[in-house]
Image (cartoon, coloured by chain):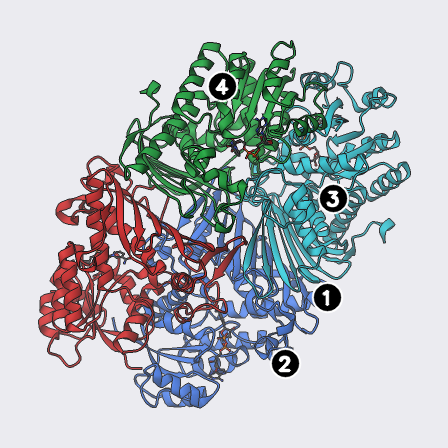
Chain colours: A cyan, B blue, C red, D green
Amino acid sequence: MQRLNWGLIGGGEGSQIGPAHRLGALADGHFALAAAALDADPARGRDYGARLGIAPGRAYGDWREMLAGERGRDDRPELVTVATPNSTHFEITKAFLEAGFHVLCEKPMTMTVEEGEEIVRIAQAMERICAVNYCYSAYPMVREMRHMVASGTLGRLRLIVASFSHGHHGDAAQADNPRVRWRYDPAMAGISGQFADCGIHALHMASFIAGDEVERLSADFASTIASRALEDDAMVNFRLSNGTVGRLWTSSVAIGRQHGFDIQVFGETGGMRWASEQPGQVMYTPLGGRTQIIEKGEAGLSEDATRLSRVAIAHPEGFPMAVANIYVDLAAAIRGERTGALPLAGDGLRSMAAVHAAVASAGQQGAWVDARPPMFR
Amino acid sequence: MQRLNWGLIGGGEGSQIGPAHRLGALADGHFALAAAALDADPARGRDYGARLGIAPGRAYGDWREMLAGERGRDDRPELVTVATPNSTHFEITKAFLEAGFHVLCEKPMTMTVEEGEEIVRIAQAMERICAVNYCYSAYPMVREMRHMVASGTLGRLRLIVASFSHGHHGDAAQADNPRVRWRYDPAMAGISGQFADCGIHALHMASFIAGDEVERLSADFASTIASRALEDDAMVNFRLSNGTVGRLWTSSVAIGRQHGFDIQVFGETGGMRWASEQPGQVMYTPLGGRTQIIEKGEAGLSEDATRLSRVAIAHPEGFPMAVANIYVDLAAAIRGERTGALPLAGDGLRSMAAVHAAVASAGQQGAWVDARPPMFR
Amino acid sequence: MQRLNWGLIGGGEGSQIGPAHRLGALADGHFALAAAALDADPARGRDYGARLGIAPGRAYGDWREMLAGERGRDDRPELVTVATPNSTHFEITKAFLEAGFHVLCEKPMTMTVEEGEEIVRIAQAMERICAVNYCYSAYPMVREMRHMVASGTLGRLRLIVASFSHGHHGDAAQADNPRVRWRYDPAMAGISGQFADCGIHALHMASFIAGDEVERLSADFASTIASRALEDDAMVNFRLSNGTVGRLWTSSVAIGRQHGFDIQVFGETGGMRWASEQPGQVMYTPLGGRTQIIEKGEAGLSEDATRLSRVAIAHPEGFPMAVANIYVDLAAAIRGERTGALPLAGDGLRSMAAVHAAVASAGQQGAWVDARPPMFR
Amino acid sequence: MQRLNWGLIGGGEGSQIGPAHRLGALADGHFALAAAALDADPARGRDYGARLGIAPGRAYGDWREMLAGERGRDDRPELVTVATPNSTHFEITKAFLEAGFHVLCEKPMTMTVEEGEEIVRIAQAMERICAVNYCYSAYPMVREMRHMVASGTLGRLRLIVASFSHGHHGDAAQADNPRVRWRYDPAMAGISGQFADCGIHALHMASFIAGDEVERLSADFASTIASRALEDDAMVNFRLSNGTVGRLWTSSVAIGRQHGFDIQVFGETGGMRWASEQPGQVMYTPLGGRTQIIEKGEAGLSEDATRLSRVAIAHPEGFPMAVANIYVDLAAAIRGERTGALPLAGDGLRSMAAVHAAVASAGQQGAWVDARPPMFR
Ligand SMILES: NC(=O)c1ccc[n+]([C@@H]2O[C@H](COP(=O)([O-])OP(=O)(O)OC[C@H]3O[C@@H](n4cnc5c(N)ncnc54)[C@H](O)[C@@H]3O)[C@@H](O)[C@H]2O)c1
Ligand SMILES: NC(=O)c1ccc[n+]([C@@H]2O[C@H](COP(=O)([O-])OP(=O)(O)OC[C@H]3O[C@@H](n4cnc5c(N)ncnc54)[C@H](O)[C@@H]3O)[C@@H](O)[C@H]2O)c1
Ligand SMILES: NC(=O)c1ccc[n+]([C@@H]2O[C@H](COP(=O)([O-])OP(=O)(O)OC[C@H]3O[C@@H](n4cnc5c(N)ncnc54)[C@H](O)[C@@H]3O)[C@@H](O)[C@H]2O)c1
Ligand SMILES: NC(=O)c1ccc[n+]([C@@H]2O[C@H](COP(=O)([O-])OP(=O)(O)OC[C@H]3O[C@@H](n4cnc5c(N)ncnc54)[C@H](O)[C@@H]3O)[C@@H](O)[C@H]2O)c1
């Protein structure tokens, strides 16, 4: 197995998500870090790239420089990851796709629905993969849940209840701290705060597990800290295409919840529950039966859940391994092998349409609005 | 301490809530069962009453008979509990209040807002206690949470997130079973199914802990089993008078949740969480600090939480003891002693107003509507 | 159903276990408190008895007085509960049995094996019930576990691992507090501290669930606070008659464990686990299958577990209801009806033999010793 | 940062622990897999090595071949990992240490105490690192517990209670399956089964957290499946040098426990608890205070716990990252930088002495025996 060359944009020293990408891409030996533009500060980016072992000249100060330097090389990256702040995702992703690179873009993929549609079209036209890092969907047990729904274990789905809530922005005294403030400032974060930041992970997962799409929604937004222009708490009711009812709560002022991402899925013949803080287990209850604990690594799980688990039953495999699973599937896709269910540009676009729909609904007292991007209606 | 005479209407043999009332009223020796009309079937009611040790002639076949037989006695009950099906609560409660009895009425107190207002007025006019059995509010640790909010531990409240969801009506094949069907049939259950049955417990608790009232709400109802006219799943967003944001999910098709009543309360300086399946603990997180487990029975709890706990720290005290605590406070109130926060007719009325508001909102695509009873606006 | 007259010795105002006995005996209406000698202080005992509603003259200052006053009455108690300090159990229990009363004695039943054998003989000779308050064995789900073992669900038992550990005596600064000190002082507590206080509950439960008896054991005792003559921490390895391996840890210095009583039972075809802080659930794992949660109140449980549960599935039923179940079974036994598995004098005797065996073993560097009372060898 | 060359022996395709080593060594980019002898079958080993991207000629069929091929190279591995079956650890580790390589050896390091002492002496003489893969000690929160003890948060330690129990060998019908049988066959596994396999992890952790050594112990072994010559269940009581009491249960027939490794540590001023299935949290209770949840990634943790955590608070970091932390510390040690507390040959030797002591004790009815290797007495 030859390693694939990999490029990374953003995710510099001290960044939040950078370590997970580096761990994820390198862990299984599928990728080698060949080129990067790691930091908003060119000198810091080059220096850190050198320390990460990137060959001289390939640790760039800027993504445009990197695009220029890499596009013509024989050993250019097969995959480029975009892990910069949200507002830059669109132009970087677009530029690399157009130059024929496969891209893994952080969420949210774009700031507008139009940009999202453009990315989908470019990826299609260029016949390149544009994946979006909905990494929770790559936990083995989330794949197992998707498999259980697809194979009919739960019957027709009736109801999905998800939450992604934490309390890390609950301190009003910190609201003006620049590391926090930008998230609730429309000038920097766009039209949505907490829902665009965390809610879309949960909304994607609902679709992902259901194997269905969000059709319409109604939202209630709140800025519980007065100085915030954007919501720090949101409740979104939605319906999937086949009528499944959805309920999604997301908050950043839920003091005491740390990484409170969980999802419950209820169908005609059973229910199940998963939580990101104990990601190796699914609680499953067949209709009329007892709740059972499905363990990552147990015998008889689906091919996908089995393939994406690396260590023995009940040995926890954390968040970095979920990101690594995205890279496993990307490597396979790039090599033309069969992959699991990678989140793609279409998913990123749907999220953006849902964000815009939720903002519109919240602005109209919770009116129900179409949540689909025009191109998928 | 002289036992108080007690009368029970409904709660016959095999009923769901009857045992909790009998245990609750008798457990501490405050009440003695003096008279009863236990069953819809007069003969069964008389027979069961006799087996419970009620004196001959005071185990009635019917509540009207009981009212007639008891109202003139010197040793008539000081308190009458109404534990019959919902549609009968109003007339029975009204009749006994008007005859000068104290009443503990099961929830929901009435079927309409008008009836609720009438009960409030009668109780006031007669100077009788009309309590409503929001028994979860009598768990020591729920009282502790209320105390913590009142004493400012959490600062101004921002957000309350509650759920009361189970899966016991999730079997479509059982939907026509009469024990289940009536709950979703407007002819028998009134205008609301699951929200009026379980949701109002959670809504009451939100108000109870916050020490504040629900002002307006927006609802999304679903009948996930097609044959049901009334909702088996509901999401209600609400606002308390002081602006606290509320979110409440209730469901009877959440297969795998057994007694899924839990509540999270978030304020400016902390958050907390309680669940009915582990009622002796509160998870409390001060802003910027670690999550702590507050245990029923630990030193230094509020007077109310301490008073209502009967056995040592970490010995579980279950649902029957919560109901018993309602009776403890009723006995104290009847004796003119200081009590904790008994849920009263005003609370029952507010619930009814909220039910009607939620139905109206759900029928108008989630429009926000006033949730207060006219008499409290 | 006629109430049975009941007498209570000890369990006075402010006592630890008294409230559980009063709740337990009264809750279901099987017993009425007819006579009592509640307190070491005669005046306090009489006064409290009067406040509990005992008829004048039947609230005694002393158990001997009570025995004298009650033995000749027609309406004398059918059952007398002994809830005084340990060293008095033997003489009180003996005296009441010999006078023909049924007795429920608190644990430990006696201080010596010889006393224990004497109680067994007297109960037999008098044809009276002498029960011992191993109340945890009366939780519905503990009865269910016993049933599962008896009906072969786990196959032959291989291993039982139990612990009963708390940290409430972990503060060295409190070691001289009289409420704590007596427990580790041989003059008052006898030959064993924590093992005789809590360990025997766990040892009884192991036997109870297994339906088998402890044959031999090896113990390691420690006094982790130097001033203590008796152990505050103990590990006991044991073997049941049929070879099942047992391991039991008990501690009073396990700071952070509150009511840490749990038991795991492993057989050829499955394992299960129960914890006293969540007593309504058993975690059960069939060999080769998934862990399942068995819920109190679910359909299809054994007759005994069903009968002893009072409220609906997943509504917690706490410690007072476990004690009440002991009284339910006592009432049935007194009435000559079929009962579940009441812990009897033989069980109390076996505990005493095990305590003496453990002390002997701990004193001989963990040598294995016979744990059976001579009369049962 | 230059990658260090790394060699791997054992851990071939389909092996249990191989993936964790590859993930762990590669994840952070400290090591590059330069040479390997991966499999008992030379052809399979060479082929798999090639597929892992090892340069032609450096994927060896055999460790002796690898030693011969690598020892003279300039770019020879700086670290060699030994992940072969237990009985081969000694000779491979010895050979590579003597040739001047740093070694990370899987546990148990050797089969006898004498071999263990020899390894310690060789590592010392050669001035090479010989680490042992007690990888659980590299979880950030285990490091935090060690730090808390060292800095006096718990006061003098009184008691440590550990268990490492699972049920994966609980099926008697599988007892003759070769994958299971060898573990209980003295010819292949040596003198101890489950205790040498899992128990020593827990025993090491007790020492590690306490910062103290096991001095003496008493053991009770059981073979609950009759055909087994070696124990599948063991209880070991021990004492640390400073008198701390220890209790350790390990089992492979605990059906329903999956990866049941947990440890409780109790001192004069507090207690704490950690479990391998939720490795990012420590439950900590200060004397007289409430139980608190310490979260990996929270502010204010020790330098070591902070350094070894890669993703944000409450994002789980599983078993592969614990192994990676061993490699992080090895890379630092090789580079002469400051490291955390790496488990070294002395720890491997102590484990071996404890295994031999436990076997001796179990064979003498639990007699207390010295658990220290002669060279450390
Ligand atoms: N998938 C997930 O679970 C997840 C989790 C966290 C963050 N994210 C996403 O990852 C992205 C980055 O978030 P973060 O929290 O790591 O942010 P961060 O602010 O911690 O780090 C951003 C990094 O990008 C670098 N950067 C900024 N502008 C750049 C530019 N023009 N060129 C190159 N580098 C540049 C910064 O120097 C920094 O190193 C965001 O889009 C965020 O939404 C996703
Ligand atoms: N507070 C709570 O937590 C809680 C829990 C369950 C039920 N409830 C409420 O308690 C009430 C009873 O519910 P349930 O589940 O016990 O119902 P159920 O159907 O199990 O029992 C109702 C009982 O009332 C008797 N009854 C019916 N009509 C009567 C009449 N006219 N006169 C005398 N007796 C009559 C029936 O014979 C039966 O014994 C309902 O209002 C319900 O909402 C409250
Ligand atoms: N089964 C259980 O789970 C459990 C739990 C706690 C205690 N206990 C047992 O219950 C017994 C009492 O324990 P406690 O913790 O309640 O003790 P306590 O000290 O709190 O109360 C003892 C009570 O007995 C009274 N008393 C003492 N001597 C008396 C006498 N000679 N005559 C009448 N009354 C007398 C005292 O005044 C006091 O009211 C002990 O044997 C203890 O082991 C059992
Ligand atoms: N630290 C831990 O948590 C942990 C966990 C599991 C296993 N282990 C240890 O790891 C070691 C391996 O265990 P495993 O479960 O992976 O075993 P395994 O049987 O699954 O794999 C052993 C691997 O070593 C290879 N091998 C055997 N003999 C060899 C030789 N002479 N030269 C080269 N390769 C050889 C085999 O082909 C196989 O690939 C054991 O010592 C075990 O105790 C440690």
Q: Quadrant of ligand 1?
A: top right
Q: Are marks 1 and 3 on the same chain?
A: no
Indicate the position of residue B156 as horizontal and vertical percent values.
52, 47
Q: Position of residue B147 (x, y in %)?
A: 42, 53
Q: Residues within 10 Å of mark 2 (few under 14, many from 20)?
A: few
User: Looking at the picture, do discs 3 and 4 lie on one chain?
Assistant: no
* Label 4, label 1: how far apart the Cα atoms are: 72 Å
Q: Which mark is residue D130?
A: 4
Q: Which mark is residue B187?
A: 2
| Residue at the spot 48% in from the left edge and 10% down from the top edge | D126
Q: Please tell me whether mark 2 sits on a helix, a strand or a loop.
A: helix
Select label 3 or label 2 by which is in front: 3
Q: CA distance from mark 1 to mark 3?
A: 42 Å
Binning the other alpha carbons within 10 Å of mark 1 as few (below 14), some (14 to 19) or many (20 upward) gives some
State if disc 2 and disc 1 touch (CB < 8 Å): no
Q: Which mark is residue C40?
A: none
Report how far apart the C-alphas of labels 3 and 4 lie in the structure.
41 Å
Which image quadrant: the C terminus of chain C?
bottom left
The residues bearing labels 2 and 4 have C-alpha atoms spaced at a distance of 79 Å
Which type of secondary structure does the marked residue at label 4 adopt? strand
Query: For mark 4, does the 10 Å Cα neighbourhood hold few (<14), some (14 to 19), or many (20 or more) residues?
Result: many
Report helix, strand or loop for mark 3. loop
Mark closer to the observer (3, 4): 4
- The residue wearing badge 3 is A340
Decide if residue C1 is on the left or right side of residue B110: left
Please tell me whether residue C274 is drawn above or below residue D144 in the rendered image.
below
Up the image or down, D124 lies above or below D90; here it is above
Q: Chain of mark 3?
A: A
Q: Which one is nearer the viewer's eye here, C39 or B354?
A: C39
